Amino acid sequence: MSILIKNVLHAEQQTDIYIEKNLIKKISPNITNKADHIIDGTGKAAIPGFYNTHTHAAMTLTRGFSDDLVVQEWLEKKIWPFEAKLSAEDIYWGTKLACLEMIKTGTLFFSDMYWFFNTTAQAVDEMGLRAAISGVLLDLFDEAKMKEQIKQNEQFYSQMEKFSDRLQYVVGPHSIYTVSEKSLKWAKDFAKETGCKLHIHLSETEKEVKDCLEKHGKRPVEYLEEIGFLGPNVILAHALWLDKNEIDIIQSNQVNIAHLPISNMKLSSGVLQYNLLKKSNITLTLGTDGCASNNNLDMIEEMKVASILAKLTTGDPTIFPAEEVFEMATKNGAELFGINSGIIKEGKVADLILINLDHHSMVPLHNLISNLVYSANGNIVDTTICDGKILMKNGIVEDEDLIKSEVRRLLKNIN
């Protein structure tokens, strides 16, 4: 399949973009190549799609279900009992709803951690997005559960060939307070053996740090270093409560961090030490977390909050400028997950979105990236192209009404 986008704004000039199969073949004014699909880019700008590096996709089912509570009460009395009722069918449609929201708001990749691996993978595959899907490890220090989940993860990995190469398997131990040391060490060894990423929640709350000190005599990052878990393939979700030694350990082990500002603020979990992490040249990416604690998957909204939160907490209005947070939400995520994308350039994979420059939030256009980060939200996305395939055009996604109606139907039986 080929796509020709005519007269679109890119790199501060009007140009054409020619896509063949799944690659950007040519960027130049007045391209005359024939194409299967021709898109009029007049009044639009082409930008790379967003990389949501930590979420729980099917938790769209919990959007607005329980808000404004303390974390432990929220989890134990509301979220976990609700999740215990979910079936594979629920997860399938909840994941499809998440994919719909991401397509509509310009996200082309997400790193997921949730139950029902195969169901999630099937839903993502059908929707046409990219994803790194975690085989969850959450053994609650039970030996039998550990063995069962290790076996499941080995099976998940072996089944990846039945899905598109847009999908990656990731080993996903939930956290140090829900996963035994044996499971963590197995996850580390299996990730090394298979070349996969390791994705874990860490240092999300002050209580987690205090509990780790009491149990292990070390802080969370120090504990993971001691058991040999850390390395360049590791992604820490949250990583809020770090001391100087932990930051040094993260730097020396080339560990990556997924920053989730809105979820952290809503749950009053803490604040990422952006200025210290930036000075240490630690790779930072951006994510939304799940809809239970955000309550949406809008990466454009997430960029604004990330930037202004850093400015507020450091007292420095010059820190975390728009261009930097935009790279964090695009290029950094693509590089972390080894995808030849994240920027629009000849030879790169055709993962891009077209945004509506006539939207009121984009007028006037003194600076495209500034408007995008500080003014806009996901409603400005007009067209979404992933892996050279058009997933949305003129704001319309195939089967979106069916997805919404199925979620509404299923929730009547869950609540």
Image (tube, grey):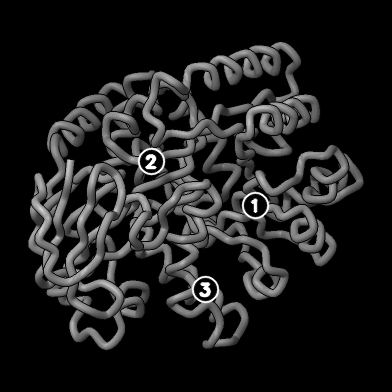
Q: Which residue lies under the disc numbered 1?
A: 204
Classify mark 1: residues with Cα within 10 Å, few (<14), some (14-19) or many (20+): many
Classify mark 3: residues with Cα within 10 Å, few (<14), some (14-19) or many (20+): some
Q: Amino acid at mark 2?
A: Arg
Q: Position of residue 216 (x, y in %)?
A: 88, 41
Q: Which residue lies under the disc numbered 2?
A: 130
What secondary structure is found at the residue carrying circle 1?
loop
Question: Considering only vertical position in the picture, is 204 above or below 119?
Answer: below
Q: Residue at x 80, y 30 (%)?
A: 181
Classify mark 2: residues with Cα within 10 Å, few (<14), some (14-19) or many (20+): many
Disc nearest the viewer among 2 and 3:
2
Q: Residue at x 75, y 15 (%)?
A: 143
How many marks can you see?
Answer: 3
What secondary structure is found at the residue carrying circle 2?
strand
- Residue 315 seen in the current view: yes
Q: Position of residue 414 (x, y in %)?
A: 33, 24
- Residue 394 seen in the current view: no
Disc nearest the viewer among 1 and 2:
2
| Label 1 – label 2 distance at C-alpha | 26 Å
> Which sits earlier in the primary sequence, circle 1 or circle 3?
1
Q: Position of residue 290 (x, y in %)?
A: 44, 45
The quarter of the picture where the N terminus appears is top left
Q: Residue at x 31, y 49 (%)?
A: 23
When asked about the image quadrant of residue 180, the answer is top right
Report whether 341 appears left or right of 209. Answer: left
Q: Amino acid at mark 1?
A: Glu
| Label 2 – label 3 distance at C-alpha | 29 Å
**Which numbered circle lies on residue 309?**
3
Q: Position of residue 78 (x, y in %)?
A: 48, 36
Question: Considering only vertical position in the picture, is 37 above or below 115?
Answer: below
When asked about the image quadrant of residue 183, the answer is top right
